[in-house]
Image (cartoon, grey):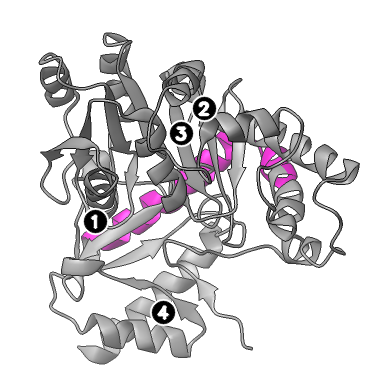
Amino acid sequence: MSHLKLFIPGPTEVRPEVLQAMAAPVISHRGPEVVALQRTIAQQAATIMGTSHPVLFSTSSATGLMEAGIRNGVRTRVLSIVCGAFSRRWFTMAAECGREADAMEVPWGEAVRAEAVREALSTGRYDAVALVHNETSTGVANPLAEIASVMRDHPEVLFMVDTVSSLGGMPIDVDALGIDFCFAGVQKALALPPGMALCSVSPKMVERSRTASGKGFYFDLVRMIEKAEKGQAVTTPALPQMYAAKVQFTHILSEGREARWARHRTMAERVRTWAKDRFALFASEPHASDTITCISNTRGIDVSALVADLKSQGCLIGNGYGDLREKAFRIAHLGEITPPMIEDLLARIDRHLDRAA
């Protein structure tokens, strides 16, 4: 198969060394080799996340851990901050899991205000907050540090954060931010093949899980932690992804968290400058993501035709998501994407626009 360079919001480009690691022979998932492997990647992931909390791995997409947060962490009512398609999913999931939930609706393209969260929590109605840090559908990065400051004044409320499209590309320090449950997929800024998700779990989240009802078996965080302490998974883990994770996490830590964040910021600023010159940003610029830029189709171009043209040249970008289809398009600049790759992509889009003019 010919290789398409992926500038979509995941899955993203994977280094050849990582793919090669997945070809290692299958071994017993209960043997000492896997115990050592799981402990290694858990420590690496904890460093990447900035946490001393246990890090767990799930053979699922991040949506599985999103549901785990609801089932393990919500007793009475969750405040779900909705500012796009994926934060809407989390709110919908709460109801489908039989939990009480209120949506704090934020217009698409805008970020939630920390003061709005403070006002909602002052009612005393909530025992958990569900926040998507980086809303992939809109390119909005919610002000995580500001919201974390509000959460410190409500220690009885669980702070659950989706960092699916920000972990590994934007500043995340779980312990410093006081995040109780932080989860992500691996196929975005962490630049691994899809098939595994990871999360950090605070002592407060563990205690909440111990008394949770209706949390099921597969995503029981207490059961997962008990196994992880032995270097094992509850059920058969995704061994190829674990092999790959060791190689990629080593690479990420070699690059350095701050250097990696800076590279993502450089690419984001370049794409935002280009987008403002050619179209307009969909996201409010002060809260524009450093891993994904959503561009408003102010010129009324045929976005599907642009996507198809770029695909014929070996590059893939994203149309607008859901209701934003044809109204916007998305360029991801995350994981192992580099500034020269971004320059090449933007030049190809410029040539398409010139031809279509």
Marks 1,2: beta carbons within 8 A = no
Q: Quadrant of residue 328?
A: bottom left
| The magenta segment | 250-276
Disc 1 designates what residue?
85
Which residue is nearer to you in this view: 281 or 135? 135
Neighbour class for label 3 at 10 Å: few (<14), some, many (≥20)?
A: many
Amino acid bearing label 1: Ala
Q: Which is nearer the N-term, disc 1 or disc 3?
A: 1
Q: Which is nearer the N-term, disc 4 or disc 3?
A: 3
Magenta stretch: dominant secondary structure? helix
Q: Secondary structure at mark 1?
A: helix
347 sits to left or right of 338? left
Which residue is nearer to you in this view: 14 or 309? 14
Amino acid bearing label 4: Arg
Q: Secondary structure at mark 3?
A: strand
Q: Which is nearer the N-term, disc 1 or disc 2?
A: 1
Estimate the spatial distance between the alpha carbons at disc 4 and disc 3, rounded to whole Å: 37 Å
Residue depicted at x 77% and y 54%? 243
Disc 3 designates what residue?
182
Estimate the spatial distance between the alpha carbons at disc 3 and disc 2, rounded to whole Å: 7 Å
Q: Which is nearer the N-term, disc 4 or disc 1?
A: 1
Estimate the spatial distance between the alpha carbons at disc 4 and disc 1, rounded to whole Å: 29 Å
Quarter the C terminus occupies: bottom left
Disc 4 designates what residue?
348
321 sits to left or right of 26? left
Disc 2 designates what residue?
201
265 within the magenta span: yes
Estimate the spatial distance between the alpha carbons at disc 1 and disc 3, rounded to whole Å: 19 Å
- Residue 13 picture location, percent across and down: 58, 65
257 within the magenta span: yes
Q: Which mark is residue 330?
A: none
Quarter the N terminus occupies: bottom right
